[in-house]
Image (cartoon, rainbow, N blue to C red):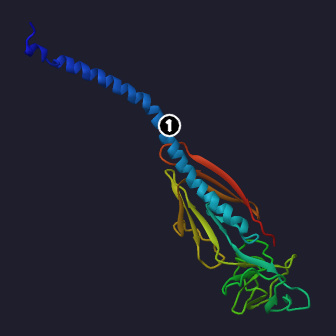
């Protein structure tokens, strides 16, 4: 006859140890089986994060560079600094009567616009005519500090049909009778690092002959930048090569080109 004590007998210590050992083997196997998919998922997330950083810069450049002043793109810092002058508006100046023409033989302070602008230009904007290069000196560059350069400042009284400006004799006419109204320059400043550097966008400063090169200026756009190179294939074609990293994945590289839409 079975006694109540024998019916209530539990696991022995040896049986418990054996059960724990079997559970440990199963758990280890499951972890090994899951480790590769988890590592692949983590790598995918890191690659996506690195791509996002580079794609953000490409998107900003694709939006801004095509609208830059003709021949205003310039590169410094061994390819790590890009600068250009954004166009706010543009139009045609009157070169022959009837009406108030832009006199190119003497200093002039106003002229009629051939077709009304979409909005009244703000005072303080710069007007540029026939920008032929991005040099820091001379008569045909908006960056030039030469008194005989090709830009002047918009003043009060300007309307959608007439430009008023600080008296200026522009050095040469535009082949298409075109003028540009421009604002503050924009600089993209890259500070690459093996573990991931930065790219900043700097604006709000006056047009000047010296291109900004301080990579700590401006607003942070992207991190994780291992390498970057801006270049000018031609005066109207800007290229950028970016290499981004995140964690331990192999670097992700991007190459893009942007053509300035406007012509002198």
Work out whether residue 154 or residue 159 is closer to the camera in this orientation and state it.
159
| Residue that lies at the very extreme toward the front in this rendered image | 1
Can residue 78 be seen from the camera position used here?
Answer: no
Q: Is residue 150 above or below residue 251?
A: below
User: Tag 1: Cα neighbours inside 10 Å, few (<14), some, or many (≥20)?
Assistant: few
Relative to 194, 66 lies left or right: right
Q: Is residue 70 above or below residue 234?
A: below
Q: Secondary structure at mark 1?
A: helix
Look at mark 1 in the image and give the residue it sits on: 40
Can residue 189 be seen from the camera position used here?
Answer: yes
Q: Quadrant of the N terminus?
A: top left
Residue at the (52%, 42%) spot, across then down: 44
Relative to 233, 25 lies left or right: left
Number of numbered discs on residues = 1
Q: Quadrant of the C terminus?
A: bottom right
Q: Position of residue 175 (x, y in %)?
A: 87, 76
Relative to 12, 250 lies left or right: right
Relative to 212, 85 lies left or right: right
Residue at the (54%, 56%) spot, across then down: 192
Work out whether residue 96 or residue 243 is closer to the camera in this orientation and state it.
96
| Residue that lies at the very extreme toward the top in this rendered image | 1
Q: Position of residue 228 (x, y in %)?
A: 60, 55
| Residue that lies at the very extreme toward the right in this rendered image | 97
Q: Is residue 184 above or below residue 30?
A: below
Q: Position of residue 25 (x, y in %)?
A: 33, 23
Work out whether residue 60 or residue 14 is closer to the camera in this orientation and state it.
14
Q: Position of residue 194 (x, y in %)?
A: 51, 50
Residue at the (67%, 85%) spot, across then down: 122
């Amino acid at each position: 006859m079975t006694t109540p004590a024998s019916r209530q007998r539990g696991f022995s210590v040896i049986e418990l140890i054996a059960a724990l050992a079997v559970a440990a083997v199963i758990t280890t196997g499951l972890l090994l089986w899951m480790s590769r998919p988890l590592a692949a998922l983590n790598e995918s997330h890191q690659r996506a994060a690195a791509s996002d950083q580079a794609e953000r810069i490409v998107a900003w450049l694709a939006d801004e560079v095509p609208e830059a002043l003709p021949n205003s793109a310039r590169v410094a810092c061994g390819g790590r600094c890009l600068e250009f002058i954004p166009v706010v508006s543009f139009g045609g100046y009157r070169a022959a009567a009837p009406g108030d023409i832009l006199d190119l033989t003497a200093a002039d302070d106003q002229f009629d616009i051939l077709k009304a602008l979409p909005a009244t230009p703000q005072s303080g904007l710069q007007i540029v005519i026939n920008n032929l290069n991005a040099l820091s000196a001379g008569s045909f560059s908006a960056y030039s500090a030469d008194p005989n350069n090709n830009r002047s400042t918009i003043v009060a009284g300007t309307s959608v049909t007439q430009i008023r400006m600080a008296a200026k004799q522009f050095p040469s006419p535009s082949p298409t009778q075109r003028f540009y109204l421009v604002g503050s320059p924009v600089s993209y400043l890259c500070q690459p690092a093996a573990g991931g550097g930065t790219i900043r966008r700097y604006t709000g400063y006056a047009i000047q002959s010296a291109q900004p090169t301080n990579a700590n200026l401006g607003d942070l756009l992207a991190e994780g930048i291992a390498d970057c190179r801006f270049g000018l294939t031609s005066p109207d074609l800007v290229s950028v090569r970016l290499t981004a990293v995140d964690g331990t994945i192999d670097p992700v590289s991007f190459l893009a080109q942007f053509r300035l839409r406007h012509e002198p």
